[in-house]
Amino acid sequence: MKRFSAQFIYTNSGPPIKRGLISVDNDGTILSVENYDCALKENQSIEFYNGIIIPGFVNCHSHLELSHLKGVIDEGNGLGDFLMKVRNVRNINPDDIISSAHSADRDLYNEGIVLCADICNTTDTFEIKKKSRIQYLNMLEVFGIIPEKAVHRMEEIISVVKKADEMLLPYFLVPHSVYSVSLPLFRLLKEKTLTNRVTSIHFMETESEVSFISNHSGPLRKSYEEAGLLPKNPEMPENHLTAILNEVTPSGNLILVHNTFADRNTIKEVKKRGNTFWCLCPDSNLYIDKKVPPVEVLISEGCEIVIGTDSLASNKKLSILSELKTLQRHFPAIPLEVLVRWATINGAKALGKDDIFGKIVPGMKPGLLLLENLDLVNLRLLPETSVIRLNYER
């Protein structure tokens, strides 16, 4: 057993506790949380830290498979250019892909991530996840806008499903985005996902999605044309709203990723689905489009917000803390306690794992992190704020 204390403890089960005490079993299970009302006395058996103890981070969106693309794609050229370059450079030496994914997995662990929803188009990262100290939920992603190839696209992902089953890896089939999935493919996928507990989809990441879906024009059309992937007669959902409400499985939790160009009306209507979570990856949005999502609108509409890192193809590091710093910089009115909730308990709820992760309460095993070098008077993150794991695991 170990005992930890700090200037503040954010348990996510009540107000922050000042100089409280957490007792943890050797396997990481929380045994007790005690509030001494600031009167905790020094004790040799207590590890006291000058910072804030929080639950482990939950990353609701990543792409380990793209880790080898770090620094390869230029910043700020928009999603159409980004997708075109990903297609052109994605298939390189398999050893490089695996090596980079291994490194990314270590980085995620060192950045305090305990639970992660990771997009998979192949089985490349399965062995890494099987051995990882992070618990992964594999989102097996389907895409393709050529209607005649819908069945073939499903057959391709089913081969990935078989491998996940063999390795006993948790997974769900998910669509890539509204602009990259044909109506026939959406409907085949919906049949296969009627029992999904979790689904995710890239949502309104770029302004050009609307023009491509409505009249097949704009930068995304150019990207598809140059790749030779634009069908003569595209069959697509009418808009983002009809896609979410009619073509995506209604079961389980739905994580909408990015939301950079989501408008208030769409947000209001999509919320009618229920069990919907809005995943923010601001560092990636700034990297690709130099934009941040409409966080104030999401908050005012009562949206459940979670955090993701996206991939190293569109981010300089895989750090939930970095994402929170970016959000605080652009939206300084958001309290630190709220940012921490988005990055911990909200993510655990979205992934259906809030019985284990996200709260520092007896019986749960959330992982413990220490935020240090921050403004403890105003409870604000600083550029130099860092996160470390309180390593009690055996």
Image (cartoon, rainbow, N blue to C red):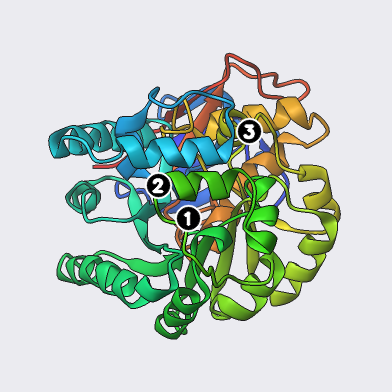
User: Element under label 2?
Assistant: loop
Name the image quarter holding residue 72: top left
> Residue at the spot x=47%, y=49% of the render?
225
Q: Position of residue 387 (x, y in %)?
A: 49, 27
Q: Residues within 10 Å of mark 1 (few under 14, many from 20)?
A: many
Viewer-closest of 156 and 394: 156
Name the image quarter holding residue 111: top left
Q: Amino acid at mark 3?
A: Asp
> Residue at the spot x=78%, y=62% of the render?
266
Spatial CA distance of label 2 from label 3 is 21 Å
> Residue at the spot x=25%, y=46% of the render?
132
User: Element under label 3?
Assistant: helix
* Residue denoted by label 3: 289
Q: Residues within 10 Å of mark 2 (few under 14, many from 20)?
A: few
Q: Quadrant of the N terminus?
A: top left
Q: Position of residue 147 (x, y in %)?
A: 44, 73
Q: Kindly report which numbered mark, 3 or 1, lies closer to the viewer in this rendering.
A: 3
* Residue denoted by label 2: 227
All told, the count of numbered labels is 3
Q: Position of residue 378 (x, y in %)?
A: 78, 23
* Residue denoted by label 1: 357
> Residue at the spot x=26%, y=55% of the render?
122
Left of 68 or right of it: where is 277? Answer: right
